[in-house]
Amino acid sequence: MGIRGFCALFLLMTATAVSQTLELPQDFRQHNLLDYNSNLLNPVLSLQQPAQQQLALWTRWQWQSIDADPTTLYLSYLRNEGDVAFGAGFFQHNTGLFQQNGGVLNFAYRLSLGNDFGLAIGMNLFGYQRQLADDRFIPGEPVLPIEDEVNDFIIQVAPGLEVQVERFALGVSFENLVDYNFAESEAVTASDEKTITVMGRYAFLVSENAAGRQTFLQPQLYYRRIPIYDNQVGLGAVWSAPSYWVQTGYNSFYGFALGAGARLFDRVSIGGLMEFGSNDNDVGGNTSYEVVLAFSFGRKRPEPPKEEPEEELIVQQAEPDPEQAEIATEIDAQQRAIEEAALRQDSLIAAAREQELALQQRRDSIQQMQEAALALRKSQDSIREAEEAALALREKVVPEKGEKYQEVSQAEGLEPGFYLIANVFSTKRYYTLFMQRLQDKGLEPKSFYRSTNKFNYVYLRRYNSIEEARRARDSKFEGRYQGELWIFRVR
């Protein structure tokens, strides 16, 4: 263990014996971080940050008292680029016995495995110096030859992952999966002394305003294993709106919590939380306080250019000049002559126009006869196609081996035939994204909704015969769609 480690153990035993108080667990006590700096609870939660860039400060005063109470301060910068998030931070963490000062690097990545399914992985890398936070219980004349200070430098790796299915997520994080003390040249914790958190959460979408900003309710339930101490079970919920948020929660070790905050000018966020201590542990019902301050920034939408007011040009009229008046009279005479010539030209143009109108009327009568003949042919073709479709729809279809095929006797408002299906959705958001993606590829997708199973069916075209539908499916819609296709028949 070394002299430094033995010193720390001796100090811990002495402090416990003298003060008769319960020491805090070594974790960051970050169970109330539901909105800002939540990556300290699980590194993948930095992907949930709505702003592109964010600078956030979180501080916690544990069990306020006259004595120096344990505090935690965490200042971080995070950048979210959609499926990738990264950042760095500074923290100061006081457990009552030790004080830790250092920095942390964060990285998280989301891997999409389907329309409604994804996997997020991330890691926090801590590097900090650990010192004694309180030496009031060190005897003046120590019996053992121990050093006056504990000054360790520790590297700590905290990975996490989360499985996401639509708006539900289930994750696990290891706060100290790997830790190494460079001063002692040994690991800080053994393999059975790891802090593990398992958490499930679900986001209920409440509303969305005209700017696309959402209001949602997110409850979550977690289980936290901390070596030596009792395991913690907790639940919490946050109501998050564009201009404010409210949260509440309960932890089996720390007690009940209630907090709120405001978002100002779409940039600045400030909030606070009170945690009423639990009487289930030796500490009792002392109150803790938390404060959150955040500043969001990044790309802004360009503002439309402002229209400059047009300046009016004021022209002062001078008194008429006799010479200019004579010139104006000549100009008026010339203008009248031009107008008379124009009138004669107009009469000639009118006569020519009448002749052209008579010719156009004859052309229109010929075109009307041609259109009537074309309409008759189309009517005959439609009757023939309807007869062919009726014959084809009465045929019995035997699905081929391995063929994905579904047949119903009738469907709400659907024309009988064979529909070439590209995808089926139960979620409106993904249905809309898929339709837009097909349109961007130059396709003209259509859809119908079945109330029997509450699914939206997206299809590329309807056919009158199974042969036509199979040819389109096997040819990948003439090479225009490379995804999976199958046939849905309405009799």
Image (cartoon, rainbow, N blue to C red):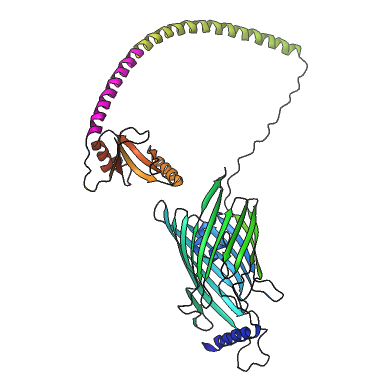
Question: Residue 162, percent across and down?
Answer: 45, 61
**Among the 4 quarters of the image, the one containing residue 234:** bottom right
- Our reading of the magenta stretch's main secondary structure is helix
Quadrant containing the C terminus in the rendered view: top left
Which residue is painted at 58% across and 49% down in the image? 300
Q: Is residue 115 visible?
A: yes
Please, which residue is most extreme toward the bottom here?
Answer: 143
What's the magenta region? Answer: 368-396
Question: Residue 32, percent across and down?
Answer: 58, 64
**Residue 93 falls left or right of residue 315:** left
Which residue is painted at 60% across and 40% down in the image? 304
Query: Eyeballing the image, is 207 above or below 11?
Result: above
Which residue is painted at 25% across and 46% down in the image? 403
Closer to the camera in the image, 357 or 254: 254
Question: Residue 391, percent across and down?
Answer: 23, 30
Query: Eyeballing the image, is 106 above or below 483?
Result: below
Specify whether residue 394 is painted magenta: yes
Question: Residue 30, percent across and down?
Answer: 57, 67
Please, which residue is most extreme toward the front here?
Answer: 280
Q: Is residue 32 visible?
A: no
